[in-house]
């Protein structure tokens, strides 16, 4: 029991450390859009960017929670991990909703026009719609009359699309990830996600 408690502490600490480091990116790798902001507008824009990264990391953690890693399964048990998976899903959806509100708030809620150059923002909207449907169906599967087998098939097929949209959105919506450490960190994250998804589907 003591060993399990220590391992839980270490794993949670590592995940929190990864999350904390990721959320410092908007401070150390500022995009040009923040240079022209001052006061509350700058705070809102930066907070919006941090929450965007926070939501992306929670999506990444979803893969870990249901990755069927023997160590995690033994320490927490499958039932607990799936509970955390559901809670994490709702949490990231709420954060994903607040993220664009703060970004738009920094521009006094002036909506971007329907032009091709804003395609990364539209990808973000599409991603949020998919996330909402994904989390909604997962939480109210039985009430919606969807059997477990159908839900699992949908889950498997939609999940890669969500990760794809997420990385396309992050890579293109801000110049923060154009080069340097932030770029390589995002590429590394994409490689890890591909590996985890492949591992999951092969199992």
Image (tube, rainbow, N blue to C red):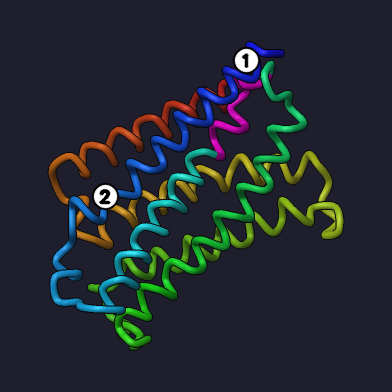
Residue 7, percent across and down?
Answer: 57, 18
Residue 70 is marked as 1
Query: Is residue 81 magenta-colored?
Result: no
Residue 71's place in the image compared with 200, above or below, is above
Q: Categorize mark 1 by other alpha carbons within 10 Å: few (<14), some (14-19), many (20+).
A: few
Q: Is residue 203 visible?
A: no
Q: Nearer the viewer, residue 118 or 6?
A: 6
Residue 29, percent across and down?
Answer: 18, 52
Q: Main secondary structure of the magenta part?
A: helix
N-terminal-most mark, 1 or 2: 2
Residue 186, percent across and down?
Answer: 29, 41
Which of the 4 image quadrants contains residue 172? bottom left
Query: Viewed as shown, does residue 46 lie left or right of 166?
Result: left
Query: Is residue 71 magenta-colored?
Result: yes
Residue ID for mark 2: 25
Q: CA distance from mark 1 to mark 2?
A: 32 Å
Residue 1's place in the image compared with 89, above or below, is above
Residue 104, percent across and down?
Answer: 36, 78
Q: Nearer the viewer, residue 77 or 188?
A: 77
> Residue drawn 63% across and 23% down?
68
Magenta residues? 62-73
Quadrant, the N terminus: top right
């Amino acid at each position: 029991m003591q060993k399990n408690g220590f391992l839980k502490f270490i794993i949670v600490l590592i995940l929190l450390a990864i999350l904390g480091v990721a959320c410092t990116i908007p401070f150390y790798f500022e995009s040009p859009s923040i240079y022209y902001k001052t006061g509350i507008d700058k705070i809102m824009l930066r907070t919006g960017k941090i929450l965007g990264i926070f939501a992306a990391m929670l999506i990444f953690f979803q893969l870990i929670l249901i990755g069927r890693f023997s160590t995690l399964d033994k320490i927490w048990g499958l039932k607990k991990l799936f509970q955390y998976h559901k809670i994490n899903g709702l949490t990231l959806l709420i954060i994903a909703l607040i993220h664009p509100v703060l970004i738009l708030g920094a521009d006094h809620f002036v909506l971007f026009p329907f032009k091709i150059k804003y395609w990364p923002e539209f990808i973000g909207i599409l991603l949020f719609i998919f996330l909402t449907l994904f989390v909604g169906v997962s939480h109210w599967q039985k009430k919606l009359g969807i059997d477990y087998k159908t839900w699992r098939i949908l889950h498997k097929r939609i999940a890669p699309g969500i990760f794809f949209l997420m990385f396309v959105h992050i890579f293109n919506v801000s110049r923060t990830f154009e080069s340097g450490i932030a770029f390589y960190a995002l590429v590394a994250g994409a490689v890890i996600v591909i590996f985890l998804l492949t591992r999951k589907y092969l199992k």
